Every structure is written in C-alpha cells, then in structure tokens.
Amino acid sequence: MAAPAQANHRLLWPYALPYALYVSLGLLAPEVVSIDVVYGLRIVLCAAALIAFRHRYARLRGPRSPAVSALVGGLAGLVGLALWVGLVLPFAPVSGEPWTEWGFVLRCVAAVAVVPILEELLMRGYALRLLLQWDRARQAGEAQPFAQAFDHSSIDDVAPGDWTALAILGSSILFAAGHLPHEWPAALAYGLLMAGLWVLRKDLLSCVVAHAVTNLGLALLVRGAGLWQLW
C-alpha cells in the first residue's frame, strides 16, 4: 500500500521539532546560559520552526464558529487554571525563586504565544489523531496496527473532533510525561480537558486559546501571590 503524501511518519518531524527545541533549550546549564537567554532562544527558534512548517500542520480552525471556539476555549482555560493550581499545589515545592523582571516577561511571552501552539499541535493535533488511527487499525484486526497508522495513514484524514477513549487517554499521558513529576496529576487532568475541547468544538483553536488563557492566568497568579513554586 502506497503511503499518502502527508503520511504520519513524514509529519512527525514538523510536529515534534518545535517541542523538542523548547525542551532541549531548557537543558542548557544555567551557569553557561542565563534563563533569560534560554527563554529568548525558545521564543525565536520555536516560533521560527512553527512558521517554517506552517503548511504541514492541521488547521487550527474547525467546522464550527471560530469566535465561539475562542470563547469556549477562554472559559475552559479558566477552569483549567483552577484545575492546575488545585492539583499542583499539594505536591509542589514549599517555595520557589522569584524571577527577574525581564525573565518573567520572556517566560510570559513563551507561555502564552508559543507553548500553547506547539504543545496543542503535537499532543492534540498529532499524537491524539495518530493514536486514534492506531486504535482503529487495531480494532479492525490489522496485523501491524501501528505500522498501518504510522507509515500508511495520515492524521489529515481524521475528521475534526473524532476520538476513541484510548486516543484521549494516551495523548493525555504523553502530555503529562512532558512535565515535572509533581505536575503529573495536574497535567493528566489538563490533557483530558484539552481532549474534551477537541471533541466538543472539533478544532484545535479552542485548545490553543484555553492553553494560552491558563498559562497567562498562572503567570499573573504566580507573580501576584508570590507562588513561584507553581512555575
């Protein structure tokens, strides 16, 4: 069987590279590169990767009203903020180091304008739909269901909002795995919330807006209440 032009194994790199850049830049030693420089690099390089691969990504908009999706996403972002704080605070360190003014600004820009796009594209745009295709191939009795999904299918063929329980749970676990251990319960719950938006609104726009609202709200809460351990 010939693979489609946008087969999933060909799409992995465009979807994963911005996320990999963001994570790998965070591994730079602080005594070599300051945190301010790290976040500056994250904004520039991850944004550049997202722009370079923009024609390979699924559309953020779906079949329903984008204005309503943005509104629903905003409200879900506030719910997600409460969920995140409530599930992280019991497991977080007792205190955290305050950020510099410039560092705080750069991290806010990254958290609101870059992270929601790259994470939602990878987790709900790619991982959830790939796992959906694998699950469907498995249910259909394919001898090699993952190979069928990864090499001979395209996530672009998944209908907006389509899902299976395994795809939702699996993508949420992957999302949680990208966070610190004390954030895992919150990140798993948040991943399920974002997957619910995908099902409800049938788009990624609502997920991106919700993620941005949650991150902005968390930044303002951390700064206003001095809860630096949440960041």
Image (spheres, rainbow, N blue to C red):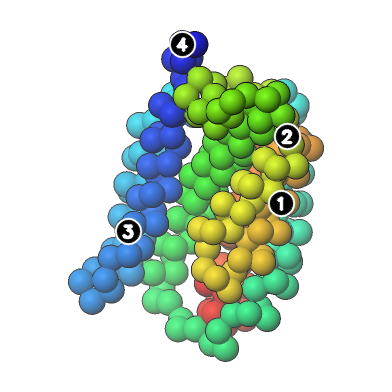
Residue of label 2: 163
Q: Is residue 129 above or below residue 116?
A: above
Q: Amino acid at mark 1?
A: Leu
Which mark is in front, 1 or 3? 1
Instruction: Using a 10 Å C-alpha cutoff, classify the residue at mark 3 as few (fewer than 14 neighbours), some (14 to 19) or many (20 or more).
Output: some
Q: Secondary structure at mark 4?
A: loop
Q: Secondary structure at mark 1?
A: helix
Seen at 68% across and 25% down, the residue is 141
The correct choice, above or below, for 81 with respect to 135 in the image is below
Residue placed under numbered mark 1 in the picture: 192
Question: Which of pointers 3 and 2 lies earlier in the amino acid sequence?
Answer: 3
How far apart, in angstroms, are the residues tagged by discs 4 and 1? 34 Å
Q: Residue at image x 36%, y 39%?
A: 49
Q: Amino acid at mark 4?
A: Ala
| Amino acid type at mark 2 | Trp
Q: Which residue is mark 3?
A: 25
Residue for point 46% across, 15% down: 3
